[in-house]
Amino acid sequence: MGNGPAQPARLCLYLACGPHKLDLTRPRVMGILNVTPDSFSDGGAHFDRQRALEHARQMAVDGAEIIDVGGESTRPGATPVAEADELRRVLPVIEALAGEGLVVSCDTRRPAVMRAAIAAGAAIINDVGALTAVGAVDAVRQSNAAVCLVHMQGEPGTMQDAPRYGDVVRDVRAFLAERARACEAAGIVHERIVVDPGFGFGKTLAHNLELLRALPEIAAAGYPVLAGLSRKSSLGTITGRPVQERMPASVAAALAAISRGASIVRVHDVRETVDALKVWLAIHDGE
Ligand code: 9MG
């Protein structure tokens, strides 16, 4: 036994997601693939699908176990896109990556997109709306896809205006427990459910830090926890760095989440996060 804190107990051994059984006895990295015109443009206004696919493949080579494909930004203040545009952006990418055997998740709040994404091969639905949209629970229930239930206060357009809680940890835990119960009651089994406190989704820096410290309590509910802090504005507030210079802060935040029981971290900088995780595991495996 060493002197440092032991690896947190991970209560969930695996995630059942489509044809995959993702081993969660070790923390896993989810790579972010935003398929929006501002992410992979060909220099003009057109989205370059080939570049997006190459980026996803590189993230997989670098150690991402899941590729999270999103066609609509959920950033604070982002403008919504039409459903048809979201479908046109994500479906070919999901189909290509799932066809190559990768575990693909689709970041969407729309039931029609969920159904189409699952039909195209998505193994996980990552919903910042926690399946609260009418028809969303049904869209997942009628498949064998997993779901990530994210806590969000408000809507992406306005959620950062003045977020307020009685007790942020208690409120987020209660919300996630209620959503997980609703999913299980509808027939989505425990092994298909992931929960996520939704860092930055209607939260101040103080709320995010409180939730990060309380991650073991959130994990104690028995569902794997996903944490997404990568490049978020709280890290900019702490470091004073613009978004393109937040990689080291993001890696530190991912490790902090993992050491408090997160099973999956959602990141932009896969290679750097995986390296840091390897070091962390090498230290903790010896305990
Ligand atoms: C889509 N998206 C943006 N931030 C996220 C986060 O923190 N968690 C999850 N699950 N999805 C996110």
Image (tube, helix red, strand yellow):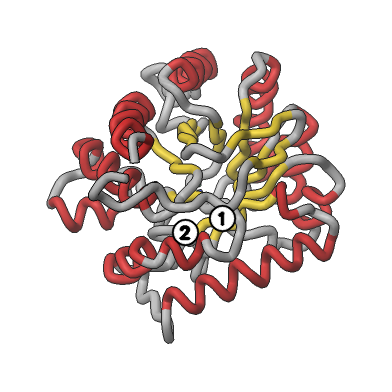
Residue shown at the point (27%, 45%) measured from the top left: 2
Report the front residue among 246 and 154: 246
User: Circle 2 sits on which residue?
Assistant: 198
**Quarter of the figure with residue 71:** top right
Residue shown at the point (63%, 69%) measured from the top left: 177
The quarter in which the N terminus is drawn is top left
Residue shown at the point (29%, 36%) measured from the top left: 283
The quarter in which the C terminus is drawn is top left
Disc 1 CB within 8 Å of nearest ligand 1 atom:
yes
Numbered tag placed on residue 128 in the rendering: 1
Q: Reading the chain from its start, which is encountered first: label 2 or label 1?
A: 1
Label 2: which secondary element: loop
Residue shown at the point (25%, 36%) measured from the top left: 247
Q: 126 left or right of 211? A: right
Given the image, on which type of amino acid does mark 2 rest? Gly
Q: Can residue 74 be seen in this view?
A: no
The crowd level at tag 1 (other Cα within 10 Å; few <14, some 14-19, many 20+) is many
| Image vertical order of residue 177 relative to residue 232, above or below | below
Given the image, on which type of amino acid does mark 1 rest? Val
| Image vertical order of residue 191 relative to residue 124, above or below | below
Query: Whole-percent x and y of residue 99?
Result: 70, 16
Label 1: which secondary element: loop
Q: Are marks 2 and 1 in contact (CB under 8 Å)?
A: yes
Cα–Cα span, label 2 and label 1: 7 Å
Disc 2 CB within 8 Å of nearest ligand 1 atom:
yes
Q: 246 left or right of 59? A: left
Mark 2 vs mark 1: give the one in front: 2
Query: Whole-percent x and y of residue 201?
Result: 44, 61
**Quarter of the figure with residue 204:** bottom left
